[in-house]
Amino acid sequence: MIPTLGETLLALAGLWRFAREGAPALRWFDRSMTGFWRSFGVAVIVVPLQVALVALQVAAPADGIGWIGLILVETGAYVIQWVALPVILYEVAARLGRLPQYVDFVIVYNWTGMPYQIISLVLTLIASLGLVGDTAVLVLALILNTGMLAFEWFIARQTLRFSGLACAALVALDFSIAIVVENAVAQIL
């Protein structure tokens, strides 16, 4: 289920090309059902980056929750973030008869998780080392997240072939899921 190094490098090159070319760059991805399921392996590849992010952001678990509780909460949130949108979108795509396009969307969407995690970790490291001020880090994080949301819209537009407004609704749904999950984690921790 975990992508090979060759598949990973090809998919990352594909992301770069997809950003420039759109749908024609889909040829750089394994668009089979095996490729679909293996794209979820990106979540496994970037687990160390997520662990580093959490370690940099959380000095110690909240009183009463302990380290095991922290790990369980963060793991649950991580899994939800990776599967919620694909599960919800599957129902929409199936009802609209767009399952082949859905597969393309999920594959490209999942692969964007790798560069996003890398850039997020770099920003967090910069912030934790105090190399730039808090305001600059917030601005950089806002630019990163806005760019990722715009790229997600572009991916949806190129793969699902939904209207621009429908793609914006999809991005808003994904953003809402992230907010709900982050707020739930904050409430628990």
Image: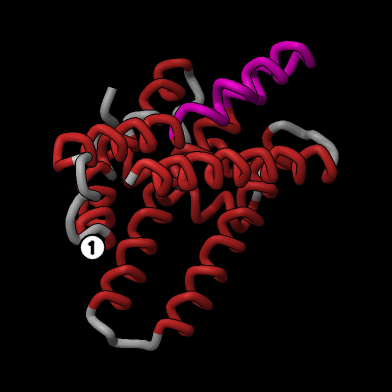
Q: Is residue 64 left or right of residue 140?
A: left
Which amino acid, mark 1? Leu
Question: Most extreme residue toward the front, as rendered?
Answer: 64
Location of residue 79 in the rendering, given as x and y in whole percent from the top left corner? 37, 31
Location of residue 155 in the rendering, given as x and y in whole percent from the top left corner? 64, 44
Q: Nearer the viewer, residue 182 or 147?
A: 182
Mark 1 highlights which residue?
Answer: 56
Label 1 secondary element: helix
User: In the rendered structure, which segment of residues is drawn in magenta?
Assistant: 82-103
Residue in the image at 64% along x and 24% along y: 89
Residue 116 lies, with reference to residue 175, above or below; the image says below
Q: Is residue 21 left or right of residue 29?
A: right
Q: Is residue 189 left or right of residue 149?
A: left
Residue in the image at 29% along x and 31% along y: 3
Prevailing SS of the magenta stretch: helix
Question: Most extreme residue toward the left, as rendered?
Answer: 67
Quick one: quadrant of the N terminus? top left
Q: Dot 1: few (<14), some (14–19), or many (≥20) neighbours within 10 Å?
A: some
Quadrant housing residue 98: top right
Quadrant housing residue 173: top right
Q: Is residue 45 magenta?
A: no
Residue in the image at 60% along x and 33% along y: 105
Residue 114 lies, with reference to residue 135, above or below; the image says above
Residue in the image at 26% along x and 71% along y: 125
